[in-house]
Image (cartoon, coloured by chain):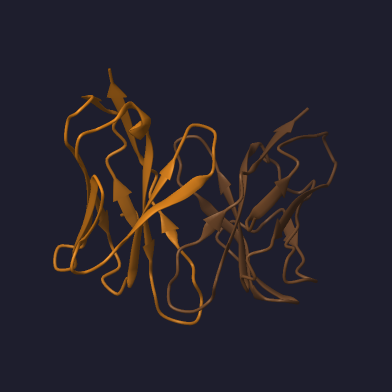
Amino acid sequence: DGGITQSPKYLFRKEGQNVTLSCEQNLNHDAMYWYRQDPGQGLRLIYYSQIVNDFQKGDIAEGYSVSREKKESFPLTVTSAQKNPTAFYLCASSIVQGNQPQHFGDGTRLSIL
Amino acid sequence: RKEVEQDPGPFNVPEGATVAFNCTYSNSASQSFFWYRQDCRKEPKLLMSVYSSGNEDGRFTAQLNRASQYISLLIRDSKLSDSATYLCVVSPGGGATNKLIFGTGTLLAVQP
């Protein structure tokens, strides 16, 4: 059953702590993306990657880091430098060519303790 | 001006009604257009792509007007299960990336 899996569904962060959100896909997609969604706002792009071992900053990359060591995996680390991390985080994937739609995982809700 | 603009709603309609949403985009070079549906506290799911010639999928019809830079979604015979937020999504095109720009969504509430 192909799809995108995000874990955990809910995550709590203490002050000064880094946390890592997992995203795994078995759709054989080259491109993967991380978005943040806040109430009343559209999805905002944090980072994206079109190929293994390469990634680019999106519109709101400050306070976040990513890695792309495997095609299937694109973890996102929310660092202590991100002062307002409470949000709904969504991972997506797509094929690279031709302005294709993106397919989403079911998200991770991050809150501050 | 926002790159993609939608009326946030809410649109409150009775079951069986026909409802239409519009969305405008600012980049005239945009190449691809989509409607996504997002249920409360869930991930967005692709509803349909929008083609220049317009396209229909059951009760849903999408139209693109490049001259006026807007996209529309028409839902006929609304069902309670259509209640959700509908996101207008635009691909700005150019380069080799597949970045998408998301509108903030239009909330639809279908009433019994």
User: Chain A colour?
Assistant: brown
Above or below, comparing residue A98 to residue B17 in the picture:
below
- Quadrant showing the N terminus of chain B: bottom left
Seen at 21% across and 69% down, the residue is B52
Above or below, comparing residue A86 to residue B63 in the picture:
above
- Quadrant showing the C terminus of chain B: top left
* Residue B76 image point, x, y percent: 19, 39
* Residue B71 image point, x, y percent: 23, 56
Report the front residue among A87 and B21: B21
Task: Identify the residue at the far front of this view.
Answer: A1
* Residue B85 image point, x, y percent: 38, 37
Task: Identify the residue at the far top of this view.
Answer: B112
* A68 lies left or right of B92: right
* Residue A84 image point, x, y percent: 66, 39
User: Chain B colour?
Assistant: orange
Above or below, comparing residue A51 to residue A92 in the picture:
below
Task: Identify the residue at the far left of this view.
Answer: B67
Seen at 24% across and 33% down, the residue is B78
* A65 lies left or right of B103: right
